[in-house]
Image: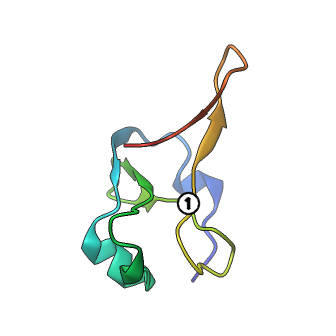
Amino acid sequence: MEPNTDDQIEGQRIVAIRKMSDTELEHEGWAARRGNSPPVIELESGAILYPSMDPEGNGPGALFGIGAADEAFFISP
């Protein structure tokens, strides 16, 4: 896996927020996690972003954030 620089992602429009497909789960070696798919953020370039439980990619993770009004949230498609 190669690191990605901000300039390859920054400024791109989000076109979809969805669950990871079974094919994508299999690609990551997470097929055993079917039914517990992590969220996927799909960009206009076709690139997808998704959380992992750790840097080694041992399993899917959760995606959290903080809104403009300082409220915590999580993404669940």
For the point 68% across and 72% down, the residue is 54
Q: Quadrant of the C terminus?
A: top left
For the point 59% across and 53% down, the residue is 7
Instruction: Say what amino acid the circle numbered 1 marks.
Output: Pro
Residue 48 appears at what percent x and percent y?
Answer: 41, 59
For residue 42, side relative to residue 61 (left or right): left
- 10 to 24, vertically: above or below: above
Q: Specify the color scheme.
A: rainbow
Residue 15 appears at what percent x and percent y?
Answer: 32, 41
Q: Where is residue 58, by image quadrant? A: bottom right
For residue 66, side relative to residue 18 (left or right): right
Q: Where is residue 73, by image quadrant? A: top right
Total numbered labels: 1
Nearer the observer, 62 or 68: 62
**Residue at the right extreme, as displayed:** 70
Q: Residues within 10 Å of mark 1 (few under 14, many from 20)?
A: some
- 7 to 20, vertically: above or below: above
For the point 63% across and 54% down, the residue is 6
Q: Which residue is mark 1?
A: 51
Q: Quadrant of the N terminus?
A: bottom right
**Residue at the top extreme, as displayed:** 69
Residue 32 appears at what percent x and percent y?
Answer: 39, 81
For the point 45% across and 58% down, the residue is 38
Q: Secondary structure at mark 1?
A: loop
Residue 64 appears at what percent x and percent y?
Answer: 62, 43
Nearer the observer, 60 or 67: 60
Q: Where is residue 70, by image quadrant? A: top right
- 3 to 40, vertically: above or below: below
